[in-house]
Image: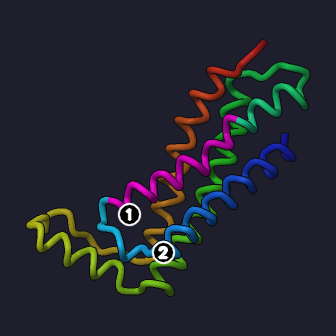
Amino acid sequence: MKNAIVKYGSYGILTGFLVFTLHLVIGIDNFDYTTNEVLGYLSIFLSLSFIYFAIKHYRDTINNGVVSLGKGIIIGVLISVLVGIGIGIADFIYTKYINPDFFSNYEEMLRKQGREDEIMEMTSSFAALFMIVLVTIIGFIISLVSALFLQRK
């Protein structure tokens, strides 16, 4: 189980970094905040798609065609945590070093749109922690659906 988690978790992290880097190369400044948000979620979902493949690999290759709901969820959540940490690190690097004005620019955009009630104090560390939690929650949902679909007793 450990090998499947590390293998597919690494694939997820690499996919997240690849999509994030591609996003930067294409030009994050060329898109509005909504488009960037959609691309961010696309990166998360692509990275977490490896959960399904990890559970299937574990079931078919390692565990003689059997996987329980619980074991599938455990595999998926552990992969989610790995991917979340990877995406959290990328987010921290981006907001701390690549674009340190990100939060102030975002607040300015919210003010211009009259959405002052959505403004909150953000730091790179808090944003990274938020991404880890968000990715893990989304990963749990994907893990649950994948494990339900792939479980065999």
Q: Residue furthest left?
A: 114
Residue at horizontal 36%, vertical 73%? 30
Q: Quadrant of the N terminus?
A: top right
130 sits to left or right of 145 = left
Upstream in sequence: badge 2 or badge 1: 1
Which range is magenta?
Answer: 35-52
Q: Residues within 10 Å of mark 1 (few under 14, many from 20)?
A: some
- The x, y position of residue 113, in whole percent, is 12, 67
Color encoding of the figure: rainbow
Q: In this rendering, is residue 117 above or below 28?
A: above
Name the residue tied to disc 1.
36
Q: Amino acid at mark 1?
A: Asn
Q: Position of residue 148 (x, y in %)?
A: 62, 21
Up the image or down, 74 lies above or below 93; here it is above
Instruction: Pinpoint residue 32: horizontal percent, then vertical percent.
Output: 29, 67
Q: Nearer the viewer, mark 2 or mark 1?
A: 1
Q: Nearer the viewer, residue 130 or 30?
A: 30
Farthest residue to the top: give it: 153
Q: Is residue 46 magenta?
A: yes
Mark number displayed over residue 125: 2
